[in-house]
Image (spheres, grey):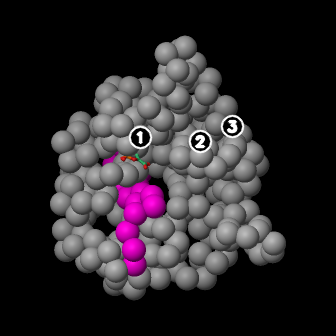
Amino acid sequence: MDKSKRKAIIAGNWKMNKTPAEAKELLTAITPLVKDADCEVIACVPFVDLQTALEVAEGTNIKIGAENCHWEESGAFTGEISAKMLTSMGVEYVVLGHSERRQYFGETDETVNKRTKAALAAGLKPIVCVGELLWERECDITEEVIARQIKLDLFDVSKEDVKKTVIAYEPVWAIGTGKTATADQAEEVCAFIRATIAKLYDQKTADAVTIQYGGSMNDANADELLSKTNVDGGLIGGASLVAEKFAAIVKAASK
Ligand code: PEP
């Protein structure tokens, strides 16, 4: 399928950064820089920043996402936020299964799958993160790891729903390390993810899914990464906290 028919998405993942006042300042700086973007632009922000971010983004082309959600609608889950709570505010996207959640907070493919289904059921579009560890790449099992994550994370997700799901390929060794996968490495795994989705669903469905690359993407390397056939966008950590750098990546995706 012609790549230009897929939705290109550049999403910032702010992680645990920015107070509401700082969020307002950053989004206000980003807004004019990305107003002519020819791709979808998303800011995924900490829960406490959502209300401010939604207010600042209202009437602009920036969509707002959260960084996680729970699989239950409500109940005794202290510290958690449900998908319905997010949609009720006007949040459209949610990052799920980020490697930092897998690494530091015991997130598993089973819980990523539950969160993904809950997000979709509530009308949120999930950005599901997958990626191999460095030693898994060194042991030459990247494809096994990725196939397993895709199969488990998307278990029982319908064909219609998978088209609303964004997959972010984020090699764990490239996140926040300054080490970027080469454009060929990113393309190889993003193509493999699409082939895996085609096997699970069908080619037409796989061709419709937006697959991002994430891992130290910045204003200097975005052009090359985003030029690849199966790299439809980026999930951006560090560089999304600097308005000019984030805007430069959006510009690269708009070409
Ligand atoms: C991320 O947080 O998803 C990410 C890719 O971070 P960074 O761009 O900082 O590597």
| Number of numbered discs on residues | 3
Q: How far apart in space, not on screen, are marks 1 and 3 (Cα)?
A: 23 Å
**What residue is drawn where x is 44% and y is 32%?**
173
Instruction: Identify the disc placed on residue 103.
Output: 2
What's drawn in magenta, residue-wise? 2-20
Quadrant the N terminus occupies: top left
The residue wearing badge 3 is: 151
- Please, what is the three-letter code of the amino acid marked with disc 1? Ile
Q: Looking at the image, is 35 positioned above or below residue 202?
A: below
Q: Which percent across, then down, holds residue 209?
A: 51, 48
**What residue is drawn where x is 25% and y is 52%?**
249
Residue 129, can we see it?
A: no
Does residue 242 appear left or right of residue 163 in this picture?
left
Number of residues whose C-alpha sits closer than 10 Å to that of mark 1, classed few (under 14), some (14–19) or many (20 or more): many
Picture quadrant where residue 110 is located:
top right
Number of residues whose C-alpha sits closer than 10 Å to that of mark 3, classed few (under 14), some (14–19) or many (20 or more): some
Instruction: Identify the disc placed on residue 175.
Output: 1
Q: How far apart in space, not on screen, are marks 2 and 1 (Cα)?
A: 12 Å
- Please, what is the three-letter code of the amino acid marked with disc 2? Gln
Q: Indicate yes or no: mark 1 CB to ligand 1 under 8 Å.
A: yes
Q: How far apart in space, not on screen, are marks 3 and 2 (Cα)?
A: 20 Å
